[in-house]
Image: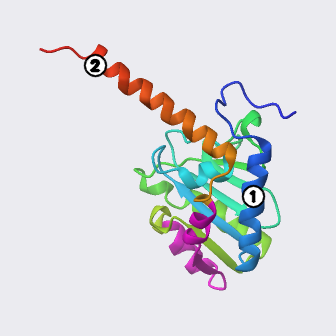
Amino acid sequence: MEQLSERFRHAMSRQEMERRWGLLRRAMEKQELDCLILHNYDNFLGGYTRYITDIPIGNYPSTVLFHREDETTYIGHGAPWTPSVPAGMSRGIGQALATPLMPTLAYTDSYMPRLVIDELKRRGYRRVGLVGESMIPASLCRMIHEELPQVELVNATTMVDRIKMIKSPEEIRKLREIVHIHDMIGAAVPAIFRPG
């Protein structure tokens, strides 16, 4: 059995993750996509990266390269010589790269795109799907167009959405647990607040 970090609560099973990866890779093959690029800025809008990695989103952005024929590349905030994902949370991740990811500091705008471009070049990719285009940094798209004009960028959001919308029995169980927790919170609110 897979050993996950004690800090990793409510993880999806390995079987569920393999189901997701398989569906995505079959869809990518049909659309001749070499990889998907996903990016998130916060916990509220990080559903795409969480769907593929099952890693809870922290306080800094992260980027995911989901390869059709290899394990995932995860790029997270941190010192470049450290892994961006703890070992106990790295299921399906072949590379966990780290770099300073600070959208409010303009000089870091090229740091993550540089790692992505290096990966795309190294692997010789020609057709790449963007998932959640409005969340992908403009600096990444600009640098890919400038440095890799042979790479075709395709909006793959709808492809992924169609896969995500059909829930497995495990996902439905998790959703019910989440709704139950929210119901308990809602029921407790009147006891917390007082007039005045």
Residue located at (61% from left, 44% from top): 172
Disc 1, SS: helix
The answer to whether residue 94 is left or right of residue 168 is right
Horizontally, residue 81 falls left or right of residue 134, namely right
**Nearest-to-viewer mark from 1 and 2:** 2
Q: Residues within 10 Å of mark 1 (few under 14, many from 20)?
A: many
Placement of the C terminus among the 4 image quadrants: top left
Mark 2, Cα crowd under 10 Å, few <14 / some 14-19 / many 20+, is: few
Looking at the rendering, in which quadrant would you find the N terminus? top right
Q: Nearer the viewer, residue 122 or 162?
A: 162
> Can residue 94 be spotted in the picture?
no
Seen from this angle, which residue lies furthest bottom?
150
- The part of the chain drawn in magenta is 139-163
The residue that label 2 is drawn on is 190
Secondary structure of residue under mark 2: helix
Check residue 158 for magenta coloring: yes
Viewer-side residue, 18 vs 141: 18
**Is residue 30 located in the magenta-colored stretch of the structure?**
no
Q: Residue 43, image x and y in percent?
A: 49, 43
What residue sits 49% from the left and 67% below the top? 139
Q: Measuring 46% from the left and 56% from the top, which residue is drawn there? A: 107
Residue sticking out furthest to the right: 1
Residue that carries the numbered disc 1 in the rendered image: 21
**Residue 150, can we see it?**
yes
Magenta stretch secondary structure, dominant: helix
